[in-house]
Every structure is written in C-alpha cells, then in structure tokens.
Image: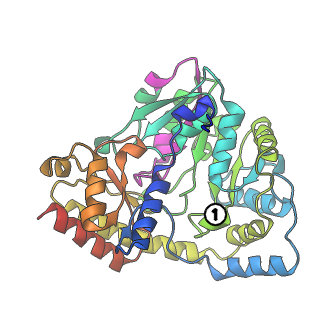
Amino acid sequence: MSLSVSKRMAAIKPSATGAVLALAAELRAAGRDIISLGTGEPDFDTPQHIRTAAQQAIENGETRYTPVDGTAALKNAIREKFQRENSLNYDAAQIIVSSGAKQCLFNLCLALLGPQDEAIIPAPYWVSYPDMVRLGGAEPVIIAAGIEDDFKITPEQLTAAITPRTRLLILNSPSNPTGASYTKAELQALGAVINDHPQIVVVADDIYEHIHWGADPFCSFATACPDLYERTVTTNGVSKAYAMTGWRIGYAAGPQELITAMRTIQSQSTSNPCSVSQVAAIAALSGDQSPVANMTAAYQRRHDFVVTALNDIEGFECRRGEGTFYAFPRVTEAMNGKSLASDTDLVELLINEADVACVPGMAFGAPGYIRLSFACSMETLEEAINRIKRVLMA
C-alpha cells in the first residue's frame, strides 16, 4: 500500500548538512577512515560549570514541565544578556525559549508568513531558511552575494528585491556558511531601506554572535537600527558559543504580538524546552564566560590555518571570515580542472577518493562553492587538507 504525503512536502528537502553527517557515519561504520568537515558542531565539551548546574537540577528534581515559553529564571537571564551585551531591553512577554534557535525561526515563519507572502534571504544562506519559509506557505526570494561582494548584500540589492508581498528579511551574521559579518554601518544602511517598508519584519539570526573575531565588533541588527526595534525579532541560543548543541536551547526576543503567536504554535507542537537544559542555559548565560573566549580563540587559529591552506590548493579561492567555524571557498576552477559539472560532484570526489566529507555550496544557494567546518582539531584539519591536496593536485 502506498501512502501519499501532503502537497507542501513536494517543495521541501531534507537538510543537506544532516545528509552529509549521516553519510560520513555510514561510511565510518563500513570501516572507512572518514574525516567529516560537514557538521556545524563544536568539538569541545560543554564547560564544566554548565554541566554541574544540570546535574544539580536533576538532583533537585527539576525534571517536570515548565511554562511553554521557558522558565522565568531563564527568561530573566536572557533579558540580562540582551541588556549587557546588546543594549537591548525586553520584557519577559517579549521572549520565548525553544528547543533550539532553529525552532524559534520555524515558529516565526509559521506565525508571520502565509500564502502570497515573500521572505528575502541573502545567499549564501543557512540550508534551512528557504524550506522554513515554504513551510510557512510563503515564497523565498533569494539575493545572491558572492565572494567578490564579501558575501554581503547591498542596500541597492535589497531595494530591488522588495515587493508589496515582502513580509520578512532574514539576516544571519556572522554567517553560516561564509563566516562573513555585517558591520554596524552596513546594518544601518540595510535598515534605512527597511524603514521605508512598514510591512517588513527583520529576523536577526545571531547564533554565532560570540564566535567572532572581525576588526569591527559584533553588532546585532536591533542595536544598529533602534528605530526598527518594534519590527525586529532577534534569535540566538547556547548551542554554538557554549558547545551545547545537544542541549537544544534557543531563544528569541521581539514584538510581543509575534512572540505570543510563536508561543501558541510551540504550545501545539513541542511544548516546553527541556527543563534540565534550561537550568544549564542559565549557567551558560550568567556564569563564567572565559570558556567561550578560549574556544573562540581556538576557532580563530584554525580559521587562519584553513584559509591559508585552502588558498594554496590550485583552483580554490577562500575569503577570510570574521567569525563562525566555517570556510567557504569558491572551487569552480578546481571543478574545471577535474572536468566536474558541479560542486556536488567535487564533494563526491572528495569523500570517495580523499575520505573527506564536506557540504556542496549548492545546498546554501551558492553553486561553485563548498563548505568546510573547522570545528575539529588542528591535527585533523592538517590531515584533511593533505588528503584534499593529494586528490586535487595529483
């Protein structure tokens, strides 16, 4: 018996990064020595003081349902974080805690978007943005910004993409997959365009806020554009900066009516995020921040090595990033040198002949590029680069 699924699924694809991770695990299980540079996950352990807080929460019996949108204690820690680090002030009713920042973004798309609506997404983009928009019933509108543009869109491009149907602009800075980060002045220039279109909401995906080393300090969109505070939703979480991917805690702050709608959606889907993880997140946001600085320093050292090493590979062109733990080289010349038709073909070549897994740029809306994660040891990165060179420069 064959069962049909809903029509909306025709336009939705599984996560490309998840697929690469699954393939690498499958090949390892078959005995292959695969180096996976595909996953966006810190290789560090969650800091000890955060783990200790979670253990104590279990001993204290904090294992029951919490309010759907997060505990009062965690919301207060998030409010203090926004005030301390971003000069943004929110009431508790303007904050939602979810099972990862990804769920916050998904809730927002369902709460805000509908048929006939459009959402502007700069490319390269995180793989899930377009399909989240489609699941919200709307149409993604892609603005391309390549390596020559520092992977950042301009006010002119934004102006040209806006129509009466535009309801949402998604900004991710520092960016997954490119590592590019908008400066305060660049955000203000984009904000000046949005200011003329009162129907548009901006969602700032700041999940890599603390993994940042650019010459210009990190700046959140609402901080740069206070006049758009009432039309900005800021999402963040503890997964990347605190090496807490499996704990599944993200949060968002913004206009109360939108946050309320997101809470209602969450109440009918996952309900509250994990109670123990919420206690751990309080320790992360309010406790010792030195582990974050130490991890970020390690990422920067790896970044410096990887970018230099990739630019030494014939046919690769890699821009320096301002943050995250990804490199995003253009590889069109390398593809041509091996008579490959696409970046997907190059990725298949690398996993089949070099035992190195990475993600094709096509998945991020940027054909002709590949994404490599350097959230692994320097020894692993050196071996991965050597393997890539052996295959491509033979």
Residue 302: x and y in percent read 37, 71
Q: Amino acid at mark 1?
A: Val
Q: Report the span colored magenta.
A: 159-187
Residue 324 visible (yes or no): no
Q: Total of numbered circles in the picture? A: 1
Q: Is residue 178 magenta?
A: yes
Q: Is residue 124 magenta?
A: no
Residue shown at 60% from the left, 65% from the top: 245
Q: Name the foreground residue: 188 vs 339.
A: 339
Residue 27 visible (yes or no): yes
What is the quadrant of residue 67 in the picture?
A: bottom right
Residue shown at 62% from the left, 39% from the top: 1
Residue at far front of view: 1
Q: What secondary structure is found at the residue carrying circle 1? A: loop
Q: Name the foreground residue: 29 vs 138.
A: 29
Residue at far top of view: 164
Residue shown at 27% from the left, 49% from the top: 345
Q: Name the foreground residue: 276 vs 327.
A: 276
Colour style of the rendered protein structure: rainbow
Answer left or right for 99 relative to 329.
right
Residue 37: x and y in percent read 39, 64
Residue 347 position (above or below residue 45): above
What is the quadrant of residue 318 in the picture?
A: bottom left
In the rendered view of the protein, which quadrant contains the C terminus?
bottom left
Mark 1 lies on residue: 238
Residue 379 position (above or below residue 196): below
Residue 348 position (above or below residue 139): below
Q: Name the foreground residue: 324 vs 228.
A: 324
Residue 262: x and y in percent read 75, 41
Answer left or right for 64 relative to 179.
right
